[in-house]
Image (spheres, rainbow, N blue to C red):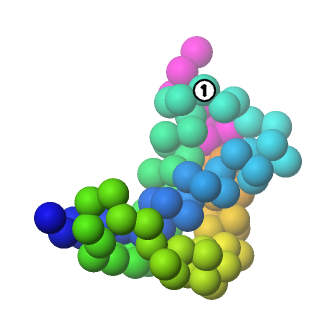
Amino acid sequence: MSQIKNYMEEVVFSLMKDVLSDINVCSCEKCRMDIAAIALNNLPPKYIVTDKGELYSKVDSLKQQFEVDVISALAKAAVIVKRNPRHE
């Protein structure tokens, strides 16, 4: 069965750990999810159709194409969350 998926979610989550390691920001799940949501809201969606469980053949080329924009969006989102964390 085919699924539709926003590929940018994959790119954001695959790059998040490296980006956050360079920024002194809380890495709890709530903060990571807030950072991802803010970044994704500032990136254009890139929808792909794939069969469930199928490995994408063009994942690496797509990731490289969007990497710079995603890193920038993640860094900006991390600064926002760092200034206004939703936890104590």
**Magenta stretch: helix, strand or loop mostly:** loop
Q: Quadrant of the N terminus?
A: bottom left
22 in relation to 82, above or below: below
Residue located at (31% from left, 66% from top): 5
Which stretch is magenta? 81-88
Residue 36 visible in the snapshot = yes
* Crowding near the residue tagged with mark 1, few <14, some 14–19, many ≥20 C-alpha atoms within 10 Å: few
Lateral position of residue 79 relative to residue 88, left or right: right
Residue located at (26% from left, 60% from top): 52
Residue 76 visible in the snapshot = no
Q: Which residue is mark 1?
A: 28
Lateral position of residue 38 relative to residue 6, left or right: right
Lateral position of residue 3 relative to residue 18, left or right: left
Identify residue type, mark 1. Answer: Cys
Under tag 1, what secondary structure? loop
Name the one closer to the observer, 79 or 17.
17
From the top left corner, tell me how far across and down residue 84 is, in percent. Answer: 60, 36
Name the one closer to the observer, 58 or 43.
58
Residue located at (57% from left, 39% from top): 32
| Quadrant housing residue 27 | top right
From the top left corner, tell me how far across and down residue 14 is, in percent. Answer: 61, 55
| Quadrant housing residue 12 | bottom right
From the top left corner, tell me how far across and down residue 39 is, in percent. Answer: 53, 59
Residue 46 magenta: no
Lateral position of residue 12 relative to residue 72, left or right: left
